[in-house]
Image (cartoon, rainbow, N blue to C red):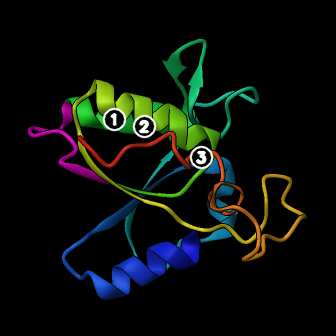
Amino acid sequence: MGYLFELVSSLRKDISIYMIQINEAKSWGVPKFVKAVYWHNDYTQDCKWGGLKNKQPCSNTKKWVSLNKKLKNGITKVFILGGGAITLDEYSLIKKHKIIYQYYQVERKYKGDGKTKTTNNMPLKERIGITYGNISNKN
């Protein structure tokens, strides 16, 4: 995903990329294309990276939902580039908060197990993953 964001950053200079990340990941560094980082320690081991827990946003997801409420015009647009289960949780919140979005199917290198490489002879649903057919491009 990092390469994808780097590519977007190089092709679309009009798009600023911000990152929300847990403090524990500071040692990983910050890519050059990221304009700023919102570091936080508001997470649990049950919900470390984001998504919904008991139907409530948590960790990184909780932070962008909070920012959306605090910004004068809210988050104006979201680009969804493939993704997994957290992406589906966030998609439900994007729709709930009526945020404009654009979805791009991205073929993944590995299936959900992180070990099995995808191949061109696999069905598109397997190459895209969980977001395939579950995210509409109609706002």
For residue 137: magenta? Answer: no
Q: Residue 45: horizontal and vertical position, in percent?
A: 76, 30
Q: Residue 130: horizontal and vertical position, in percent?
A: 63, 45
Name the residue carrying label 3.
22
For residue 75: magenta? Answer: yes
Q: Residue at x 51, y 39 (%)?
A: 134
Label 1 Cα crowd, 10 Å radius (few <14 / some 14-19 / many 20+): some
Q: Residue at x 59, y 46 (%)?
A: 22
Circles 2 and 1: CB atoms closer than 8 Å: yes
Looking at the image, residue 72 lies above or below residue 8? above
Q: Amino acid at mark 2?
A: Tyr
Q: Residue 3: horizontal and vertical position, in percent?
A: 55, 79
Q: Residue at x 69, y 65 (%)?
A: 27
Give the magenta-colored segment's residue range: 70-78
Q: CA distance from mark 3 to mark 1?
A: 21 Å
Which quadrant is home to the C terminus? Answer: top left
Q: In what element is the residue under mark 2? A: helix
Q: CA distance from mark 2 to mark 1?
A: 5 Å
Whether residue 93 is visible here, answered yes or no, is yes
Whether residue 32 is visible here, answered yes or no, is no
Label 3 Cα crowd, 10 Å radius (few <14 / some 14-19 / many 20+): some
Q: CA distance from mark 2 to mark 3?
A: 21 Å
Name the residue carrying label 2.
91
Residue in the foreground of this view, choosing between 78 and 41: 78
Name the residue carrying label 1.
94
Q: Residue 41: horizontal and vertical position, in percent?
A: 58, 37
Q: Amino acid at mark 3?
A: Ile
Q: Main secondary structure of the magenta part?
A: loop
Q: In what element is the residue under mark 1? A: helix
Q: Amino acid at mark 1?
A: Ile
